[in-house]
Image (cartoon, rainbow, N blue to C red):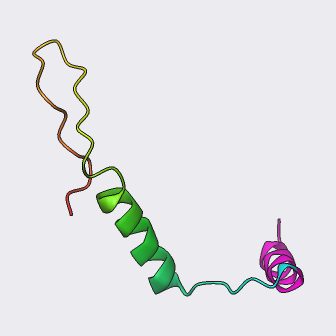
Amino acid sequence: MPDLTVRRDRAAEILGLGLPTEAEALSRLHRGATETGKDFILVLTDEDEPYDPLIKG
């Protein structure tokens, strides 16, 4: 969609939303990947060992 950015900006304006900067979006993504569920340990292996996290904080 060649006009995706224009549509995004218009939708955000109509909804009264502020768009994060690239750095803020990346920071939120990293925080979500490393902090969300940090107290949860996934164990579904035959050896009954926990999986290692894909992204280490």
Which quadrant of the rendered structure holds the C terminus? bottom left
31 vs 23, nearest the viewer: 31
Membership of 5 in magenta stretch: yes
Q: Position of residue 13 (x, y in %)?
A: 84, 86
State the image quarter where residue 15 is shown.
Answer: bottom right
49 vs 9, nearest the viewer: 49
Name the side, left or right, on which 21 lies relative to 40: right
The residue under the point 80% across, 83% down is 9
Q: Position of residue 39 (x, y in %)?
A: 24, 48
Name the side, left or right, on which 30 lies relative to 11: left
Q: Position of residue 53 (x, y in %)?
A: 22, 46
Is 2 placed above or below 32 here?
A: below
The residue under the point 36% across, 67% down is 30
17 vs 26, nearest the viewer: 17
Q: How many marks?
A: 0
Q: Position of residue 47 (x, y in %)?
A: 10, 15
Which quadrant of the rendered structure holds the N terminus? bottom right
Considering every residue shown, the one lying at the far front of the view is: 39
Magenta residues: mostly which secondary structure? helix
Is 8 placed above or below 41 here?
A: below
Considering every residue shown, the one lying at the far top of the view is: 46
State the image quarter where residue 42 is shown.
Answer: top left
The residue under the point 15% across, 31% down is 50
- The stretch in magenta equals 1-14
Name the side, left or right, on which 5 lies relative to 52: right
